């Protein structure tokens, strides 16, 4: 079989990471296998281990790619986007914190996936703190952590319930809580 160029290998790797970022958020870390990811990327399973050490290494890169997609506008824009019906209904294109929190909680302490998730929580909390009105640093940090918990929790619950009215109520209650 002919080898692909370095440029093509780089493009293939990027495609695998993008596909994995979507599939992990849609199906969970353990709900999709390497073969599924490679097939969705239009590649063969055999090429995976030439690009990644293991599935966890891919999960870490996919998590970073998903976080990079997050809205970086104003605080109001970030909250509106996060607590939107589109975000609730499209986990594959949404925040990996809300999509993967339960899966990551089952990962062993010290795992690379858990470490990357922790980094993502700190990063998003830090972004929220930066976007908040300037008050004491410790107060901003506490408020940012509370808001992050509210945002993620509301999306997780809204996705889990089978009552659309309740899902909307959860989102609206979260919106009111973080606005106040």
Image (cartoon, rainbow, N blue to C red):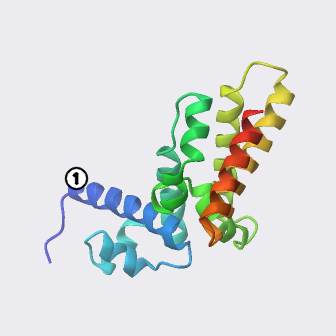
SS category of the residue bearing label 1: helix
Q: Residue at x 73, y 40 (%)?
A: 176
Measuring from the top left, give residue 103's x and y in whole percent.
Answer: 65, 71
Q: Is residue 62 left or right of residue 41?
A: right
Measuring from the top left, give residue 133's x and y in whole percent.
Answer: 73, 21
Q: Is residue 146 left or right of residue 166?
A: right
Q: Residue at x 18, y 58 (%)?
A: 5
Q: Which residue is mark 1?
A: 7
Quadrant where the C terminus lies? Answer: top right
Q: Is residue 112 visible?
A: no
Q: Nearer the viewer, residue 127 or 158?
A: 158
Measuring from the top left, give residue 1's x and y in whole percent.
Answer: 15, 78
Q: Nearer the viewer, residue 123 or 113?
A: 123
Q: Nearer the viewer, residue 117 or 136?
A: 136
Q: Residue at x 72, y 31 (%)?
A: 129
Furthest residue toward left: 2
């Amino acid at each position: 079989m002919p080898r692909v160029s370095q440029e093509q290998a780089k493009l293939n790797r990027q495609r695998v990471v993008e596909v994995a970022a979507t599939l992990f958020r849609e199906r969970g870390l353990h709900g999709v296998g390497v073969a599924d990811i490679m097939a969705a990327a239009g590649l063969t399973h055999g090429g995976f281990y030439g690009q990644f050490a293991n599935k966890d290494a891919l999960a870490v890169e996919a998590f970073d790619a998903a976080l990079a997609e997050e809205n970086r506008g104003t605080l109001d824009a970030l909250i509106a986007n996060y607590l939107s019906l589109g975000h609730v209904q499209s986990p594959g294109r949404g925040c990996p914190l809300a999509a993967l929190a339960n899966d990551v909680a089952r990962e062993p302490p010290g795992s690379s996936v858990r470490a990357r998730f922790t980094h993502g929580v700190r990063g998003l909390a830090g972004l929220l703190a930066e976007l908040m009105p300037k008050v004491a640093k410790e107060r901003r940090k506490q408020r940012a952590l509370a808001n992050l918990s509210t945002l993620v929790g509301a999306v997780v619950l809204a996705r889990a319930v089978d009552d659309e009215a309740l899902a909307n109520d959860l989102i609206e209650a979260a919106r009111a809580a973080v606005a106040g």
